[in-house]
Image (cartoon, grey):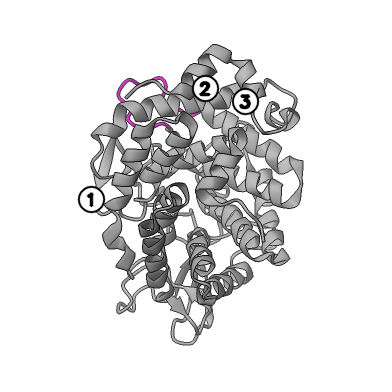
Amino acid sequence: MSVSRRTLLATAAGAAAAATTSIPTAQAAEDGAGRAPALPTLRAAADYAVAKLSAVAPGVSSFPVGTKFEKWVYSQNGNWVGGFWPGTLWMAWLYSDDEQFRTLALASAQKLAPRQYDTSTHDLGFLFYPSWVTAWRLTGDDTWRAGAVRAADSLIQRYNPHGHFIRAWGDLNNPQNAGRVIIDTMMNLDLLAFASQQTGDEKYLDIAVEHAKTAQRVFPRPDGSTPHVFDFDPATGAPIGPNTVQGYSPASCWSRGQAWGVYGFTTIYRRTGNQQFLATARKLADFALDALTPDHVPVWDYRAPQQPHDIKDASAGAIMACGLLDLSNATGRTEYRKVALRLLTALSQTCLTTKSTRAEAVVARCTRNRPAEDGIEISLPYADYYLLEGILRVLQPQDVDRAIDLSTV
C-alpha cells in the first residue's frame, strides 16, 4: 500500500498543515490545560495508525476480536465487534485518501451480510452502524442502507414491551437472561434512529426512546456512576435490581460501560432533542471526569478496590473521548472538549503499540473482561476504531459527519 497523501503532507508541512484544520486553533491546539499542543500529537497517532493498518489490513480476512501475544485473534462471523474493523478502515480512508482502505472496508462489511437477520443479540448497532451505515453514507449504494434497516428490524424483535427495554443477551426463545439489560445497549440505539429516518416509520425510534428512558431511570446512581447490568422480571417488566458481568461488583462502575453511557445518551439526545437524555449524559460524564486518574488513562473499573492503581482500559478512554467531544458540541461546554483532548493525547502518548515490532493493533493497554480474567491489558478492535474516530472528530469533523452523522435535530 502506498504512503498516503495526507501522511506526506503532514510530514512536509508540519504545523502549517495543522493550521489548515477546520477546528478553531484555540480549541484544537491546546490539550485543555495550556500544556504542549495536542494537535501534532494526534496527527502523529493517526499517521501511526494508518501505517500500521497499511501493513496489517491486506492480510486480514475475517474480524479481529482481540490480541494474543500482540497478534489479532479472529472471528469468522464478527462476534459482537465485527463492525469495528470495517469502521476502522473507513476512518483510515477518510484520513489518508488511500483507496485501498475503501476497498478493504467494503469487502469486510460485506462479510457481515448474514448478521442482518440475527435476532440473538442486541449488538446489531455495533455490527452495522460503523460498517453498513457508514458504507451507505460514504458510497450512496442503497444495498448498505437496506441491509442496515433489515438489521434494525432484527433488533426491535428484542424489545420487551412489559419493561420497555431491549433485551441484551440470548436467543429470543431462551428464558435465560430474558430480563437482562446492559448499559452497552445505549450505543445500539442509533441504528434504530437511522432506520426511522430512512423509512419514515417511527416504530424504530419509538423503541429506542423507550429503552433510553428505562435505562435513564435504572442505571444512573445519584452520583452519576452506573452498574453494568440491570435485571427485570421479563414477564411483568418489574425491576429486580443492578448486577454486573464485566464490572467489579453490582455497586461498582465499569469504566467502559460508563463511556458507553456518556456516548449513547448524547447520541439519543441528538436524535430526539430530549433534554433529559442530555442531562443524563452530563451526569455520567461528570462522574467519569472526577474519577479519572492524573494520567488520563481510565482504570478498568472506577470503584475496584485497587483503583486508582489498577490495570487500565485504554478502550474506555477512547470511547469516552468521542462521547465527550460530542457532549461538548451538544452543550457548548468547553471543559468536556478539554478533557477529551487530554484523553486522546494520553492514549496517543502512552497506549500505542509503537514500541513493538510484533504488534498488529494500534492501541495497547486494553482490558476486555477483568472478572473473567479474559483479555487483560491486550489490544481490542474498538479501541483502534474509537481512537481514530476521536482524532478525526478533532482534525476532520466534516469527514466524521459524512461517515456517522453528527447532526442534531
* Residue 49: image location, x then y, percent: 43, 29
Pick whichever, 395 or 362, lies toward us: 395
Task: Specify the amino acid type for callout 1.
Answer: Gln
> Which of pointers 3 and 2 lies earlier in the amino acid sequence?
3
Q: Residue at x 52, y 40 (%)?
A: 389
Q: Which residue has dot 2 on it?
A: 44
**For the residues marked 1 and 3, what is the alpha-carbon distance in whole angstroms?**
37 Å
* Residue 14: image location, x then y, percent: 59, 15
Answer with left or right where residue 81 lies relative to residue 202: left
The secondary element bearing badge 3 is classed as helix
Pick whichever, 101 or 214, lies toward us: 101
| Main SS category, magenta section | loop
Which residues fall within the magenta stretch? 350-362
**For the residues marked 3 and 2, what is the alpha-carbon distance in whole angstroms?**
9 Å
Q: Which mark is residue 371?
A: none
Q: Which residue has dot 1 on it?
A: 76
Q: Which residue has dot 3 on it?
A: 39
Q: Residue at x 65, y 25 (%)?
A: 20
In the image, is residue 57 part of the stretch drawn in magenta? Answer: no
